[in-house]
Amino acid sequence: MVFQNLVISASVIVFLIVTSILGVVGIGLAIVFHEGSTLVVVANSLRLPAYREQ
């Protein structure tokens, strides 16, 4: 799950950097997407306490 969170975070940041440089996404929308991805990562990490290694 930690790896999933790293992949989600890194991919969103790379996507937003590229689209911001190309002018596709404005800074305001990039901030909204970044904060949304932060909420997704937090929600995903809430599954960790229930995780049991088998």
Image (cartoon, rainbow, N blue to C red):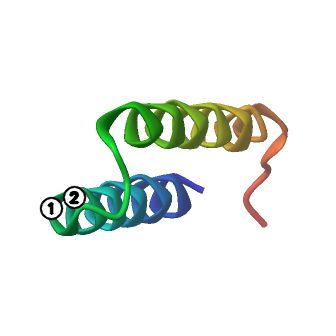
Quadrant in the rendering for residue 14:
bottom left
Residue at x 33% of width, y 57% of height: 16
Residue at x 79% of width, y 51% of height: 52
Contact, mark 2 vs mark 1 (Cβ under 8 Å)? yes
- Name the residue tied to disc 2: 17
Quadrant in the rendering for residue 23:
bottom left
Q: Position of residue 39 (x, y in %)?
A: 63, 31
Amino acid type, label 1: Ile
Q: Is residue 23 above or below residue 37?
A: below
Amino acid type, label 2: Ile
Q: Spot the residue most to the right.
A: 50
Q: Is residue 25 above or below residue 35?
A: below
Q: Position of residue 41 (x, y in %)?
A: 59, 41
The secondary element bearing badge 1 is classed as: helix
Label 1 packing within 10 angstroms: few (<14), some (14-19), many (20+): few
The answer to which of 3 and 49 lies nearer the viewer is 3
Residue at x 70% of width, y 39% of height: 48
Q: Give the quadrant of the N terminus.
A: bottom right
**Left or right, residue 38 beside residue 16:** right
Q: Is residue 24 above or below residue 44?
A: below
**Left or right, residue 20 beside residue 47:** left
Q: Position of residue 31 (x, y in %)?
A: 40, 32
Q: Spot the residue most to the left.
A: 21
- Name the residue tied to disc 1: 21
